[in-house]
Amino acid sequence: KKGFIKTLIGCSSSEKELSSKQQGNLCHFVGSWRTGMFNLTQKKSYCCFNSALARIIQVQGRAQRGLDWGDKKSPDCRALTLAEIQGIDFSKIDFSEVYEELKAKAQKDFGMSSQDIAKKLQGYQKTETRMQNIMQDKMKGFYGKK
């Protein structure tokens, strides 16, 4: 966080990395607690991922499966198991954030209009199961099982 004290003492490399991941919306806040003499220091814990898609699947998939994040002082940031992933109903996952990122990237990198992007996305969303099957195949491939 910004502030006078942080400016004076600087940030560690892990704090800088966390800040960068937070700015990229790659982290899920797990909890906070107070420490130190008189409980004046507030600490926070996060689970951070390599992509927004991974974070979305972790957060919403865990909620669906009733999986928690562990203790706030020592969060459980592990990858979901293949069995846990297979139990996720991907049609209930809100991927709108990823769609917005893809839309912005397509507009920037390929000069696609919003209408062109909408047509492409509609092709993937014609049936609820098509996107679900694509996501499940990608996740199975990622975990080495096809």
Image (cartoon, helix red, strand yellow):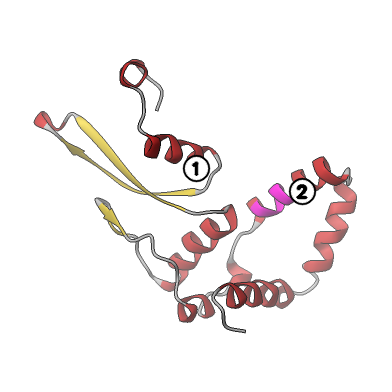
Extreme residue toward the front, this view? 13
Residue count near mark 2 (Cα–Cα under 10 Å), binned few <14, some 14–19, many ≥20 = some
Quadrant for the C terminus in the image: bottom right
Q: Which residues are magenta?
A: 98-103
Q: Residue at x 71, y 54 (%)?
A: 99
- Choose top left, top right, bottom left or bottom right for residue 119: bottom right
Q: Is residue 123 magenta?
A: no
- Choose top left, top right, bottom left or bottom right for residue 40: top left
* Left or right, residue 140 beside residue 62: right
- Choose top left, top right, bottom left or bottom right for residue 44: top left
Q: Residue at x 56, y 42 (%)?
A: 24
Compared with 85, 120 (above or below) is above
Q: Provide residue 109's location: percent of width, then percent of height.
A: 82, 44
* Left or right, residue 15 beside residue 87: left
Q: What numbered label is drawn on residue 103?
A: 2
Q: What numbered label is drawn on residue 21?
A: 1
Compared with 3, 61 (above or below) is below
Residue count near mark 1 (Cα–Cα under 10 Å), binned few <14, some 14–19, many ≥20 = some
Type of amino acid at the residue the image marks with label 1: Lys
Front one among 139 and 38: 139
Q: Earlier in the sequence, mark 2 or mark 1?
A: 1
| Callout 2 secondary element | helix
Q: Residue at x 57, y 54 (%)?
A: 51
